[in-house]
Amino acid sequence: MELTVCLPDEIGTRLAASGRDLTRRALEALIVTEFHSGRLSKPEAKLILGFDTDYEWDGLLKTLGFPLEFTLTDFEREQGILQSLGR
């Protein structure tokens, strides 16, 4: 699905002045908002944004000022990885 957003030119120009791709910023904001509302899972959000790792996803959340989601399952997975590395 393709989504089009219409902004007044002067506002669009001002928002785009940061140098970051405004289309990408809008997509990221939408996906993070939908994730936090529970309408998207983390795997779905990562797929839409083209992220291969949780590290990329966590970086986006941090950049946008959203709290990082770290579940017990995440902790147990990380603990298993560290144990397999002998740490």
Image (tube, grey):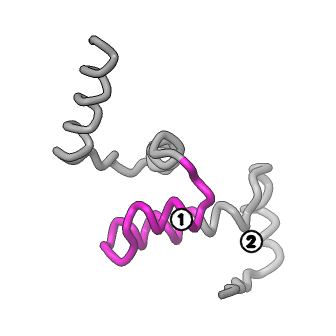
Would you place residue 63 above or below residue 40 in this image? above
Between 80 and 39, which is closer to the camera in this rendering?
A: 80
Using residue 76 as the reference point, say whether residue 24 is left or right of it: right
* Mark 2 residue crowding within 10 angstroms, few (<14) / some (14–19) / many (20+): few
In contact (CB < 8 Å): disc 1 and disc 2: no
Label ID, residue 29: 1
Q: How many marks?
A: 2
Label ID, residue 11: 2
Quarter of image, res 78 = top left
* Mark 1 residue crowding within 10 angstroms, few (<14) / some (14–19) / many (20+): some
Q: Position of residue 27 (x, y in %)?
A: 61, 68
What amino acid does circle 1 point to? Ala
Q: Position of residue 50 (x, y in %)?
A: 62, 58
Query: What is the magenta range?
Result: 28-52
Q: Residue at x 54, y 65 (%)?
A: 29
Mark nearer the viewer, 1 or 2: 1
Looking at the rendered image, the quarter that the C terminus falls into is: top left
Looking at the rendered image, the quarter that the N terminus falls into is: bottom right
**Is tag 1's residue or tag 2's residue first in the polypeptide sequence?**
2
Instruction: Give the secondary structure at mark 1.
Output: helix
Would you place residue 38 above or below residue 57 in this image? below
Q: Which residue appears farthest toward the top when viewing the image?
A: 87
Would you place residue 65 above or below residue 25 in this image? above
Q: Residue at x 55, y 64 (%)?
A: 47
Q: Main secondary structure of the magenta part?
A: helix
Between 30 and 8, which is closer to the camera in this rendering?
A: 30
Q: Does the magenta stretch include residue 47?
A: yes
